[in-house]
Amino acid sequence: MSVIWQLFITFFKIGLFTIGGGYAMIPFIQQEVVQKGWVSITDVMDFIAVSESTPGPFAVNISTFCGITAHGFLGAAAATIGVVLPSFLIILFIAKKSSNILCNKYVRYSLDAIRPAIVGLILYVVFEFMKLSLFTSGSPGFSADIKALIIFIFLAGYFIFRTYKKKKVNPITIILLSAFFGIVMYGVLPILNL
Amino acid sequence: MKLSYQEIKSRLICLSISFLKIGAFTFGGGYAMIPLISKEVVDKHQWITDEEMIDIFAVAECTPGVIAVNCETFVGYKVAGFWGSLLSTVCVVLPAFIIICIISLFFESFKNILWVSYAFKGIRVGIIILLAMAVLKIGKYVKYNIFACIILAAAFILSAFSDINTIYILLGAAALGIFYNLILPYVKRGGKI
C-alpha cells in the first residue's frame, strides 16, 4: 500500500472519530501517525502551536501538517481530504434525509459514552506531554527539567488565575507567553550566567 | 424549495466568497467560525433563519468530524443543495490547506534558528495547558455519573498501559454505552421484565 493511500485511510479514520473538536484528534495522531514514523512527537507539539496560531479549522491545519511532513504535497492533500470526508458524508446524509440521526437513541447512547472516553484519552496525552516537556529522560530514570517546570508553574498560575476571575483564556496568549518564557529561560538567562 | 438555475449560481458564488473569507481570516478553529457563518448566511443574505441555524450548530457539534466542516457543509446544503455543500467544504478547507503548505516550506529551517528553538522549548510546555483546556472543554459535555467516570478512567488506563488501538477503545465505549442504557431500566425495575 502506498504511503498516500495509507495517509488517506488513517486520516479518514481519525476524521470519523473526532468528536468534540480538533483536540480529540491528538490521541489518534499520537497513536497512528507518530507510531508509523510519519512525524515525531515533538513535531506534533509544534504543529499544535502553529495550528492554533494560523487561521482555519484546527483539525484541517494539523492534518495538512502531518500529511506534508510524511509525504510532501500529495501526502498533505490525502490527509486533508481524508479528515474532511467523513464530516462531509455524514452531514450530507443528515441534511438530505432531513431526519435527525442524533435523535436515534442508540446513536445518543454511544455518543454519551464516547465523550468521557475521549476525555480519558486526551487526559493521558496531557500526562504524556508533561513527561516529554517537563522531564528529560536520561540514565538513570527521569530528571526534572527545572526551567521547563518553572515555565509550567507560571503558565498554570496564569491559567488558574484567569479561570478563577471567570475570564476566557486565549490559546494564542498561552503560546506567546510560553514562547516568551522559553526565550528568557533558555536564551537570556544563560547569557546572564544565571 | 425550487430555485432557478440563475439563483443557485449566484448563491454558490456568494457562498464560496463568504466561506473563503471566513476560512482565511478566522483564528481559533471551528467554534470561532460559527458566529461569522451565522452573520453571513442569516443576517446578510437571509438564506437561513435563526432557528434553522441553531439546529445546524447543534448537529455540527454532536456529529463526528471537524466541527467547522460539519457546520459549513450543512449550511451549504441548505442554501444550494449538494453543490452548495461540496463547494462550502472545499472553501472552508482550502485557505487553511494553502497556508499550512506555505508555512511548512519554511518551518524546519525556522525552528533551527537558535532563538526560535528556545521559544519552541517554551511552547512545548504551553501545549500542556492548551490540551488541559481542551479536556475541560470536551469535559463540559459529559454527563457525569458513575458509568461515565468508569469509562473515562478505563480509557485513560487502557491508553496508558496497553497497546489497544484508540479506535477500539472508543468503539468499546460506544458498545458499553448502548448496553448500559438498555440494561439500566431493567436493573432499576429490580430485575423484573
Image (tube, rainbow, N blue to C red):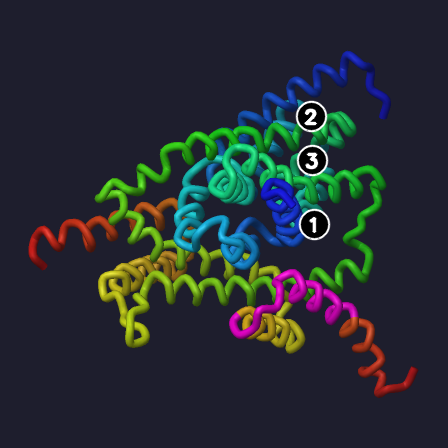
Q: Is residue B142 left or right of residue B29?
A: right
Which chain does the numbered disc 2 sit on? B
Secondary structure under badge 2? loop
Three-letter amino acid code of the residue under disc 3: Thr
Three-letter amino acid code of the residue under disc 1: Thr
Disc on res. A47? none
Compared to residue A5, the image places residue B3 above or below, namely: above
Task: Verify CB contact (< 8 Å) between mark 2 and mark 1.
Answer: no
Mark 1 surroundings within 10 Å by alpha-carbon count, few (fewer than 14), some (14 through 19), many (20 or more)? many
Mark 3 vs mark 1: tell me if same chain.
yes
Q: Reading the chain from its start, which is encountered first: label 3 or label 1?
A: 1
- Residue located at (32% from left, 75% from top): A141
Mark 2 vs mark 3: tell me if same chain.
yes
According to the picture, the residue beneath numbered tag 1 turns out to be B63
Location of residue A104 (image quadrant): bottom right
Which chain does the numbered disc 3 sit on? B
Task: Verify CB contact (< 8 Å) between mark 3 and mark 1.
Answer: no
Task: Look at the image and give the residue range highlighted in magenta.
Answer: B160-178
Secondary structure under badge 1? loop
Query: What's the magenta bit mostly, secondary-structure-wise?
Result: helix
Q: Is residue B143 magenta?
A: no
- Residue located at (68% from left, 43% from top): A87
In three-dimensional space, the C-alpha distance between marks 3 and 1, rounded to whole angstroms, equals 12 Å
According to the picture, the residue beneath numbered tag 2 turns out to be B46
According to the picture, the residue beneath numbered tag 3 turns out to be B73
For this orientation, the residue located farthest to the left is: A193
- Position in image of residue B64 (x %, y %): 68, 50
Secondary structure under badge 3? helix
Task: Verify CB contact (< 8 Å) between mark 2 and mark 3.
Answer: no
For this orientation, the residue located farthest to the right is: B193
Between A47 and B28, which is closer to the camera in this rendering?
A47
Q: Is residue B163 magenta?
A: yes
